[in-house]
Image (cartoon, grey):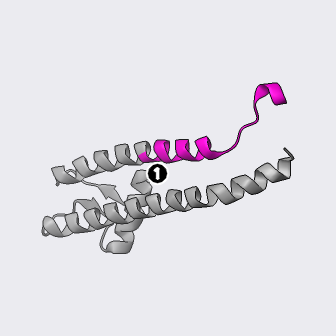
Amino acid sequence: MKPWVVTVRCARACRYNIVVYLVTFVLSWVLFALLWWAMQGWHGGRACVEGVDGFTTALLFSIETQHTIGYGSRAVTDRCSGAVALLMFQSVFGAVTQCIVTGIIFAKVPHRSADRV
């Protein structure tokens, strides 16, 4: 099989997988952003996360947490035990999700066998 044929087949077959990959991450970011934003309201005047004062900053905090890229001005405080639990859960959820979705993508990419090279 010619290399360009494999590339075209993969491009057609992988398009659906790429969409699923992107939707999975965007939905998880938004879901956790809603939880972080709601946690700020549940605890009244106590700030569970410094620097989160609206949905946009909650979304940024969610992305930063899930991909462990660093917080900058946002940080979980010790005033809310629920925030610490949510932080741990999102970190583990993000790692597991990334492993599963990346494994699915790599499983769909055609590989050349060693005997054919």
Rendering coords of residue 78 (x, y %): 20, 50
Left or right of 111, for residue 101 = left
Name the quarter where the C terminus is drawn: top right
Rendering coords of residue 104 (x, y %): 54, 45
> Compared with residue 81, is residue 35 higher up or lower down, i.e. above or below?
below
Read off the residue under disc 1.
67
Helix, strand or loop status at disc 1: loop
Left or right of 81, for residue 114 = right
Magenta residues span: 97-117
> Compared with residue 37, is residue 81 higher up or lower down, i.e. above or below?
above
Q: How many marks?
A: 1
Rendering coords of residue 89 (x, y %): 29, 46
* Amino acid type of the residue that numbered disc 1 sits on in the rendered structure: His
Magenta: main secondary structure equals helix
Say which of 14 and 71 sits in front: 14
State the residue lying farthest toward the right: 2
Q: Residue placed at 77% from the left, 52% from the top?
A: 7
Say which of 87 and 25 sits in front: 25
Q: Is residue 2 magenta?
A: no
Q: Residue placed at 24% from the left, 54% from the top?
A: 77
Residue 42 in view (yes/no)? yes
Rendering coords of residue 74 (x, y %): 36, 60
> Compared with residue 86, is residue 113 higher up or lower down, i.e. above or below?
above
Say which of 46 and 38 sits in front: 38
Q: Residue placed at 22% from the left, 67% from the top?
A: 38
Name the quarter where the N terminus is drawn: top right
Say which of 58 and 111 sits in front: 111
